[in-house]
Image (cartoon, grey):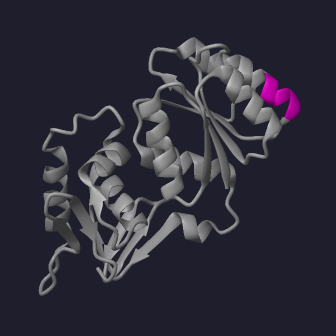
Amino acid sequence: MRILVVEDEDSIADFLRRGLEGEGHSVTCASDGREGEARALGGDYDLILLDVMLPDRSGLSVLESVRRTFPALPVILLTARGEVDDRVRGLDAGATDYITKPFSFDELAARVRAHLRLPDPQRTTRLEVGDLTIDLVRRSVERDGESIRLSTTEFDLLAFFARHPGQVLSRETLLSAVWGYEHDPRTNTLGVYVSYLRKKLAVEGRPSPIDTVRSIGYRLRADA
């Protein structure tokens, strides 16, 4: 799917671009309201992620222009937690949804999938890696048919691993995807949660499927 990201903060735009491209989407970014409006009206996009606070032209103004031309195009607003009035005005103006900053990439990706209405829902709601089965709708996990109880964060981390089986994922990538772009990269939070996952995913006679790649990050083995 083709997605337009209109966001003036480079770190957030890059965080979104990398994550969405990792999901298989084609991503175009615009850094201010005027450019975003021009790209939205002149392009052929399946969904727009639109920041409310933009230079040159506000996100709500861009939304109004988009709605006049593309009344059915999904538009998800990106807002700060305190911008309650903007969220209300945005929904009244025709925004499809909104998500508050900071956010985890998995939450945003789930909303994107919901509004894109992808033609193969089984592909997007159920992940299978080796003997691991992850149901993204029920947020349930099984290994070799045995149910495994995970916390919300443990589940989000495992789901991100499962979307990239066999791929070495850096600490920075994992922190951004699960805890949000503002998370301190010096924290040991990731290591702690990987340890939690390893203990829960290990079964008798079979080790955890998560490997450490020294000096880089972690990998979920494709054969689990």
Q: From the image, give the main secondary structure of the stretch colored magenta.
A: helix
- Asked whether, in this view, residue 25 is left or right of residue 220, the answer is right
Q: Does 138 appear above or below 38?
A: below
Based on the picture, tell me whether residue 183 belongs to the magenta stretch. no
Q: Position of residue 202 (x, y in %)?
A: 16, 74
Which residues are the magenta region? 65-69
- Asked whether, in this view, residue 128 is left or right of residue 87, the answer is left
Evaluate whether residue 151 shows in this view.
no
Q: Does 165 appear above or below 96?
A: below
Quadrant containing the N terminus in the rendered view: bottom right
Residue that appears at 20% across and 49% down: 190
Quadrant containing the C terminus in the rendered view: bottom left
Residue that appears at 84% across and 36% down: 70
Determine the image quadrant of residue 58: top right
Q: Position of residue 103 (x, y in %)?
A: 41, 36
Of residues 57 and 114, the one nearer the viewer is 57
- Asked whether, in this view, residue 222 is left or right of residue 40, the answer is left
Evaluate whether residue 102 shows in this view.
yes
Q: Does 70 appear above or below 81?
A: below
Of residues 37 and 110, the one nearer the viewer is 37
Of residues 153 and 36, the one nearer the viewer is 36
